[in-house]
Amino acid sequence: MAVSLGYVLKRVFYSLLVIIGVIVVTYAIIIFSPGDPAARWAGNPRGPGAERAIEVARAELNLDKPLYVQIPLFILNVFTGNLGVSISTKTPVLATIWAHLSSTLELLIFGYLIGIPLGVLLGVYSALRRGTPRGDALETVGFVIANTPSFWTSMALFLVLAEVLGVSSYGRIDAKLAAALGFKPITGFYTVDTLLQGDFILFLDVLKRILPPAFVVALYPTGVGIRVVRVMMSEALGEDYVRQAVALGVEKREVIWAYAFRGTVPGLTQVMGLAFAYSLVDAMVVEYVFGREGLGSLLVSAVVSNDFKLAASILIVISVFYILANTITDIVQSWIDPRVVL
């Protein structure tokens, strides 16, 4: 199925405009927030030379220029990948963010690998039994788990694992075991890196620590999947082409998956694409509770230390991730369903 080039170009153009708007707003918010980033960059100096040191730091951060000059410079730096150096850690911002973003993305991917299939299966089951106690109960379950705050679910699960079952799920990896086995990150995705290095014992440790928070992240797509698939499948099962397939004696399984469920794919793709983007923030909250070194802990650290470069860059990355996920979802949906137009 072909995708209109004009549609793709329009979506990309509008996405770029939104990204630029996000960069401008984020930078303005960070700049006008309390605290002096220049003083932080200079090491909070004291004494006779403090004022001079802060002036030098202000020049290095381009804060001595008018705002209408600072913002275009910052936009240019973002699009060229030059996010500068973190004020608090003095390390490249881009490298720092990627080291933590990989942890968040790994958790998010695991959560959706669990949540989407589970939501689809339960949604189909609920649609096939609509009007029955089981079908209605599943719809209620979907509503509840999709709207349960992830912070409380994370806290509850973490306490049950630690206090009741005695299972440690804190952090991404056993640091002592990793040091003993000579583990070194390659891609930033520890499940992949441990397999690439042949450390199966370490892989099991990483898997043990990622599955509990991934289960919490999976609750939202599961709940959304149940409700969306139930509604769409219920409508599809009443369509003429499905009734005709049943009348012609097509096998029940084929009717369900090849005919009825197939009609739900475009809508489900759109909903899950948006849900995936939304869940990035959800994953940041979950990983903070489970002590995983992701964007959540990094953002808190940046705000506390008044590291405006790092904080602004994190907020921009989150926004860009959402915009790109939304754009890609729309393009994929237009590829699946040619009727979609801008």
Image (spheres, grey):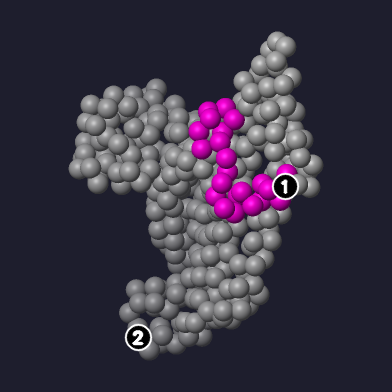
Inter-mark Cα distance, 2 to 1: 66 Å
Type of the residue with mark 1: Ile
User: Could you tell me if residue 236 is visible in this image?
Assistant: no
Percent across and percent down for residue 221 are 50, 53
Disc 2 versus disc 1: nearer the observer: 1
- SS of the residue under disc 2: loop
Which residue shows up at 22% across the image and 31% down it? Answer: 181
Residue 91 belongs to magenta span = yes
Residue range highlighted in magenta: 70-92
Type of the residue with mark 2: Gly
Rendered image quadrant of residue 70: top right
In the depicted structure, whether residue 47 falls above or below residue 162: above
User: Could you tell me if residue 1 is visible in this image?
Assistant: yes
Contact, mark 2 vs mark 1 (Cβ under 8 Å): no
How many discs appear? 2
In the depicted structure, whether residue 255 falls above or below residue 77: below
Percent across and percent down for residue 196 are 24, 46
Residue identified by numbered label 2: 249
In the depicted structure, whether residue 160 falls above or below residue 264: above
The C terminus is located in which quarter? bottom right
Residue identified by numbered label 1: 71
Percent across and percent down for residue 324 are 56, 59
In the depicted structure, whether residue 250 falls above or below residue 130: below
